[in-house]
Amino acid sequence: MNQKLNAPALLLVLTLLLLTVAMPGAQAQPAPAPCTPGISFWKLLDSVSVGYGDGRLNIDKLYAVCLPAPARQSTSNYAYDPDVGGKLTTVVKSADGKVLNTYVWYGESIGGLWELSRYKVIGGYQSVKPLAAGNYLLEFAADEKPFTRFPFSVVETKSDDPYQPAGNRYFIEGAWNEYGNMFYQRNDPQSSLTFTTWVQDKRGNENKTSTAYDAKLVNLKDGKALGEDGGTLRLEPRWLELKLYFHAPGDKNSYLKAAELLREDGRYSVRLTIDGKSYGDYPFTVKGGLIQFQGKQIREKTDPMDYIVDYLSGGRYHSWWIKRESAKK
């Protein structure tokens, strides 16, 4: 039943409406950025490799985000299916643009992520030939519309292991030796910092000995270390994750919380030494209590094909991809 408002009540409603319009926090929020298709950057680093002994490209399970509905309705459990569904492809191209191989994926949506679990190769797996030294590109496309590219290179060296067959040994390079990753759980400042980078032993024989490493998280304003980590690892002829857990200098019994880094704006860097030699610096900026995105993680300044997809917990949290500055010779 409709009721008329009396004068005091009407005045109160009008006042609340005016206050709502005037309050900055009540202004219309900008529309969220459109969901752009992409491949998880971390999974690319985990899943793309070349055979040490044969130079063949290997691609394991990947995850994609924001893929469009396939143009063709699938009759299987996979929306993207090489035989009866949409076509989700990875094309391997040489530096001159020549198509070397095409992988066609089985892809299904699971909890908001697209799982690319397996694939078929056009021409059969026997068509996947060793990759010679040079530059290459993986180009991902949904129903022939490209959405992500991932450049990499292959380098060769002669085997010098007398106990192994003669021939070349193959290594993949690219984002693995270009980036490190900073992360703290749930982006809660009271969580400890984790820094991950990738290392490998690029030689013609397998190393059986351990190698020392040392890392420092440094405030570039005064050169003082906020945190440090160190130990030994055994390098292998493939990319391995090196995870660093910083603790206060001289105190190995407690981990450095993100809040210790975030409380002062400025420039910082992770400095990593392996086997007594500088491996590289990873500089970044803290501003307003936040680590700042850089490079290809800034969506507004990056071609969607090159954007670094960092999709943690359904996009609720972030990690920060920090470009490595190689050791100066």
Image (cartoon, rainbow, N blue to C red):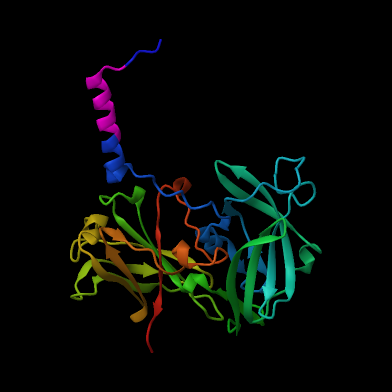
The structure residue drawn at horizontal position 69% and vertical position 73%, both measured from the top left corner, is: 93
**Quarter of image, res 58:** bottom right
Whether residue 314 is visible, yes or no, is: yes
Residue 190 x %, y %:
25, 50
Residue 68 x %, y %:
64, 49
Position of residue 38 in the picture relative to residue 269 (left or right): right
Name above or below for residue 221 compared with residue 144. below
Which residue is the extreme one toward the bottom? Answer: 329
Name above or below for residue 111 compared with residue 165. above
Which residue is the extreme one toward the front? Answer: 7
Say which of 121 and 27 sits in front: 27
Which residue is the extreme one toward the top? Answer: 1
Residue 112 x %, y %:
55, 43
Q: Main secondary structure of the magenta part?
A: helix
The structure residue drawn at horizontal position 61% and vertical position 73%, both measured from the top left corner, is: 52
Whether residue 236 is visible, yes or no, is: no
Position of residue 302 in the picture relative to residue 8 (left or right): right
The structure residue drawn at horizontal position 55% and vertical position 79%, both measured from the top left corner, is: 205
Query: Quadrant where the C terminus lies?
Result: bottom left
**Quarter of image, res 194:** bottom left
Residue 200 x %, y %:
48, 73
The structure residue drawn at horizontal position 46% and vertical position 73%, both measured from the top left corner, is: 178
**Quarter of image, res 130:** bottom right
Query: Quadrant where the N terminus lies?
Result: top left
Magenta-span inclusion, residue 8: yes
Q: Which residues are magenta?
A: 5-17
So how many labels did they put on this image? 0
Say which of 21 and 309 sits in front: 21
Magenta-span inclusion, residue 54: no
Position of residue 302 in the picture relative to residue 145 (left or right): left
Name above or below for residue 9 compared with residue 47. above
